[in-house]
Amino acid sequence: MLDILPQLAGWWRESRPFALATLVDAAGSTPLPVGSAMAVDGEGTVLGAISGGCVDVAATAQEVLRDGRPVLRRYGPADPDSGPFDVGLTCGGTVTVWTEPVPPEGARWLPVLAEAVGAGRPVAHALRLHDTGSSHLVVLPEGGREGSLGTGEADRDAEATARLLLPEGGTAVLSTGPHPDVFVAAHPAPPLLAIVTWTPVAGPLARIGAELGYRPVVLEHRPVFAAQARHAGGEVLPGLPQTGLRTLRGEGRLDGRSAVVVLTHDARVDVPALLEAVDAGVGYLGATGSAATVRDRSGRLRDAGLDEAGLSAIHSPIGLPLGGRAPAEVATAIAAQLVAVRVSPRHPGPRRAVGSGC
């Protein structure tokens, strides 16, 4: 749901009624993860996706808008003998989708959720599934919450589950009676993508990183380039990069889920920044440079006390060997390697499911 939250909040502010479909369960091969969402307004405008177009959820959403009653539906594999436009999952998996009307006067939870996500704060969202309607609860890490699932017991159970999930994120289905009827999705603060110095590669890398769910921040000690980074938008930390990394670490933002990319080619900047990132135990660490630059930098890092295990944690030359040389191509190669490391079983941070791309 996170990708469509800003637009949903805009619909709420416009008092525009819409239907919201949430993928609450999945089994087997499915193209999108549990928690994915799609919204459809009365004019048929669609935001987001549930299953990459395999399932006709938009028609169900229009039905829900007309009737004003939510619907819980399960979709399985398509019949191979049916027509090409029949509803079904060609991937072979099964998904369960909750589709509900969202009247503006009953969705005060929505701007609270959107504001928390927009600010990069961890937040959880619980919804209760009822044939006659649904209720929502937003759980914030500092103890605040908005909305209710209808009973104190349901709120307490959902909040307890949400707080267990918040550090690393995830989803859960709870039973408050004989049947599962509460869906909880927890969203931790987005992991940090720290880009050391502003170069032509930094801009496209920040944009791709944001699409991958990272929160980019540029660390730049040169005022002219710091101004360029600010003009491009996003967060900029002026001053020496190693100082900025140390500050981010002290704030708890630089951790095992974070990625650090060093683009400087200047050992006076690279070496202290890399040492700080290795010491922080970040999930991905890469540095650009020619073979000669890498050899020289490795020697300087050894002289500074970095052992072979620390050196092996640095991806340099950086990026997967895609062959491109333009800034956007280099950024794509770096991002591809970042994803490969992130989904590796050796990665210390939380793993994210890889879609089957059916």
Image (cartoon, helix red, strand yellow):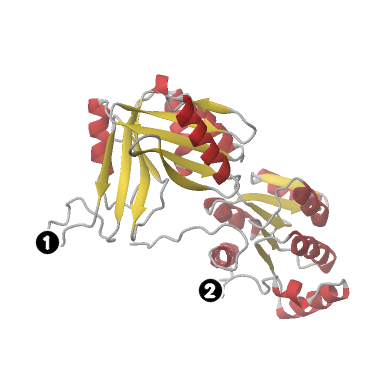
Of label 2 and label 1, which has the lower sequence position? 1
Seen from this angle, which residue lies furthest top? 105
Percent x, y for residue 209? 58, 55
Q: Is residue 303 left or right of residue 144?
A: right
Residue at horizontal 75 percent and vertical 61 percent from the top:
277
Label 2: which secondary element: loop
Amino acid beneath label 1: Asp
- Amino acid at circle 2: Leu
> In the image, which disc is placed on residue 302?
none
Residue at 81% from the left image edge and 67% from the top image edge: 271
Residue 81 numbered tag: 1
Residue at x 46%, y 59% (from the top left corner): 353
Q: Kindly report the distance in space between the C-alpha atoms of the residues bearing marks 2 and 1.
A: 41 Å
x and y percentages locating residue 296 in the rendered image:
81, 78
Kindly indicate whether the residue at mark 1 contacts the one at mark 2 (C-beta within 8 angstroms): no
Q: Quadrant of the C terminus?
A: bottom left
Element under disc 1? loop
Judge depth for marks 2 and 1 and give the one in front.
Answer: 1
| Relative horizontal placement of residue 249, taking residue 112 as reference (left or right) | right
Q: Position of residue 244 (x, y in %)?
A: 79, 51
Where 354 falls versus 107 (above or below)? below
Q: For mark 2, what is the residue?
A: 322
Q: Is residue 16 left or right of residue 121?
A: left
Q: Position of residue 12 (x, y in %)?
A: 43, 26
